[in-house]
Image (cartoon, rainbow, N blue to C red):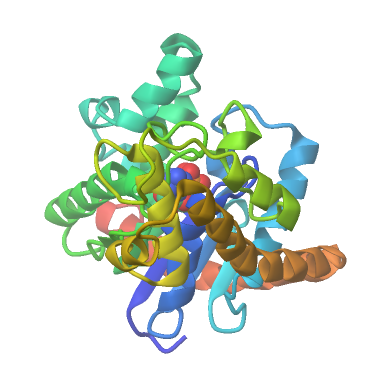
Amino acid sequence: MQGGRRVFSGIQPSGRSHLGTYLGALKNWVSVQDDYDCFFCIVDLHALTTPQDPKVLRANVREMAALYVAVGLDPERSIIFRQSRVSEHTELGWLLNCVARVGELSRMTQFKDKAQKGGADSASVGLYDYPVLQAADVLLYNAHLVPVGEDQRQHLELMRTLARRFNGLYGETFVVPEPMILDVGARVMALDDPTSKMSKSAPTPAGYVELLDEPDVIRRKIRRAKTDSGSEVVASPEKPAITNLLNIYAGLTGLSVSEIETRYEGKRYGDFKKDLGEVVVETLAPIRGRALELLDDPRELDDLLESGAERARKVAHATLRDAWTRMGLD
Ligand code: TYM
């Protein structure tokens, strides 16, 4: 840690990671790790806001740690850890609960969507309060930049509001973080329904490519991805399915959508999807290989997370103490 500008981001270990998580988050984390002091968290406390099987959760945390390393995050340079092991997250979460307003949390669209699906009355209080814990995650490290997908924009806005309000009430304490949301890949849609987001809670696995899917499974899912009427490989609002596939292609190759459209002029959806399948396999097969190797040695993954938590705790504790003092808890 050089004491430079900081990045914080996290992923919930609830269900499998998929291409959306990769393009919206992980890939961009790798791209910032040379220029920032980075904190990459496995947000296991956030996962508890919806019911989890303890055995599955335990396995998912390790799998996530393996994926973080397998995509190219370097545990020497970046701090990789799990949220529950740094108790300062929940402690600052409480302080921020006393600054956040019920009206603000009630407006969070992700809560409204999720609560609506399961019935708002039976949604956990944790699900409602989730964005405050998320704010604590980032503010504890005084992170400047938060690389996330588009669906996190509103949570980032709330986090900025809470930082500013706290600073206004108690004096300059927190850095007001900026979201890093790229144009390409920030909102990957489901393969079987381009009107809904690719999600780990999707009803069927046909909608998403898991980062640990076998190459043939990936090829099949892409081949069967929904397409629109017509046959031209061009992005347009009338063609949400092919637009989504073009975005995935662009996100993985670094080509622009118009370059890809030119490349597929006069070709059919089938040709394009066949190539896209290979593009996805080329990216994910090495990640899968490395992750499986790492998962062979769970002790090493546990050690990595433990030493990450130790490093994170030092930074987090200093910020928490500062917040305590400013609020009169010293
Ligand atoms: P989570 O676990 O739902 O998703 C992890 C990251 O992946 C991005 N993402 C997507 N991006 C593009 N297209 C998609 N279909 C897609 N699906 C997921 C998400 O935007 C996110 O960046 N609340 C957060 C976790 C969190 C966090 C934080 C993030 C907790 N504390 C502090 C940043 C900073 C969440 O549930 O992400």
* 327 lies above or below 289: above
Left or right: 289 as drawn, with respect to 100: right
Would residue 254 be seen by someone viewing this image from the given angle? yes
Front position in the image: 224 or 99:
224
Left or right: 207 as drawn, with respect to 53: left
| Residue 298 screen position, x and y as percent | 83, 63
| Residue 150 screen position, x and y as percent | 32, 48
Residue at the location (86% across, 68% down)? Answer: 297
Residue at the location (44% across, 10% down)? Answer: 121
Left or right: 40 as drawn, with respect to 324: right
Residue extending farthest to the bottom is 2
* 149 lies above or below 294: above
**Image quadrant assignment for residue 330:** bottom left
**Image quadrant assignment for residue 133:** top left
Left or right: 226 as drawn, with respect to 329: right
Would residue 90 be seen by someone viewing this image from the given angle? no
| Residue 262 screen position, x and y as percent | 32, 65
Residue extending farthest to the right is 296
Residue extending farthest to the front is 266
Front position in the image: 56 or 167:
56
Residue at the location (26% across, 58% down)? Answer: 326
* 246 lies above or below 70: above
* 207 lies above or below 33: above
Residue extending farthest to the left is 168
Tally of marks: 0
| Residue 282 screen position, x and y as percent | 62, 68
